[in-house]
Amino acid sequence: MSAEQESRPTYQDIREETEKPASDRETITSLRGNKIAPRRYHLTDKKMSALVSAHEKDGSFPNPYRYGGMYYGMVQALIELGVDKVHSFVKVKEAIKSVLVGITKKNGQNAWESFVTKAPKNDLSGKDVNGRLLQNASVLQRLTGLHPYGEKLRQVLACIDILKDANDLPCIRLNTEFKTVDSVCPINEIHRKRGRKKGTVSKAPDVVIVEPANSVEIVSVELSEAE
């Protein structure tokens, strides 16, 4: 590891700073050399307590993401399909659509329409809906670096697993069987296997899902960042 890499802050280094109002946070230097205000990826103690309390009575799994967003929709879909169970990508996609269709955005579109019509950030992120959904699932597995999108799930002792069935077709599971935060470790069978530390996801070539008729086919491609 280079001296530059060793000097880069981790999310744990700036975690306390992110709990300040955005305008009051001290800037950090991004990997691209830009000065940016650090973004919060975890639940504060107050929000965590409120979330847990809201679900204690009925015993339902607490969805830690912002209501109406894609991450909320994906986790909520997996909750409704059944936690700790493996679900085919096709079923997960339909469940996400069902959740998001019922949420109206400020522009009058429902949240699903907003997602499928969203313009890509760049040429590399111009994937079809299936590819974007699978990529968002992969992003929710991130537990390291300055952008640990899966940190809120880890706080509630859960993670997203991306698996393959007997026919090598993608499946997704909301895994809630962890006992401690440190034991949370996402599984991704779509990425090529590499040596990795707990809580990280390989950056090997990802996949796009092509959905002809009633089947799903995996095709290897290079993918960029989510959304």
Image (cartoon, helix red, strand yellow):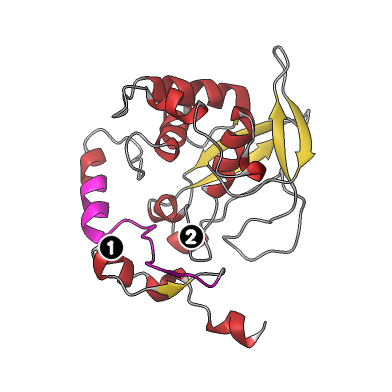
Q: Secondary structure at mark 1?
A: helix
Measuring 57% from the left and 22% from the top, which residue is drawn there?
Answer: 91
Measuring 59% from the left and 32% from the top, which residue is drawn there?
Answer: 86
Picture quarter containing residue 113? top left
- Tell me where residue 102 appears, x and y as whole percent: 34, 20
- Tell me where residue 106 appears, x and y as whole percent: 28, 29
Q: Give the total of numbered labels.
A: 2
Horizontal relation, residue 173 to residue 189: left or right:
left
Confirm whether residue 111 shows in the render: yes
| Callout 1 amino acid | Ala
Compared to 23, does 64 lie above or below?
above
**Label 1 or label 2, whichever comes before in sequence order:** 1
Measuring 53% from the left and 84% from the top, which residue is drawn there?
Answer: 7
- Tell me where residue 90 appears, x and y as whole percent: 61, 22
Query: Which residue in the rendered view is the most extreme toward the top?
Result: 213
Query: What is the magenta range?
Result: 33-52
- Residue closest to the eye, 100 or 31: 31
- Which numbered disc covers residue 22? 1
Quarter of the image where the N terminus is located: bottom right
Picture quarter containing residue 110? top left
- Residue closest to the eye, 34 or 103: 34
- Alpha-carbon neighbours of circle 1 within 10 Å: few (<14), some, or many (≥20)? some
| Callout 2 amino acid | His
**Residue beneath label 2, please?**
147
Compared to 191, does 181 lie above or below?
below
Compared to 136, does 143 lie above or below?
below
Horizontal relation, residue 66 to residue 204: left or right:
left
- Tell me where residue 221 appears, x and y as whole percent: 76, 41
Measuring 39% from the left and 57% from the top, which residue is drawn there?
Answer: 41
Q: Secondary structure at mark 2?
A: loop
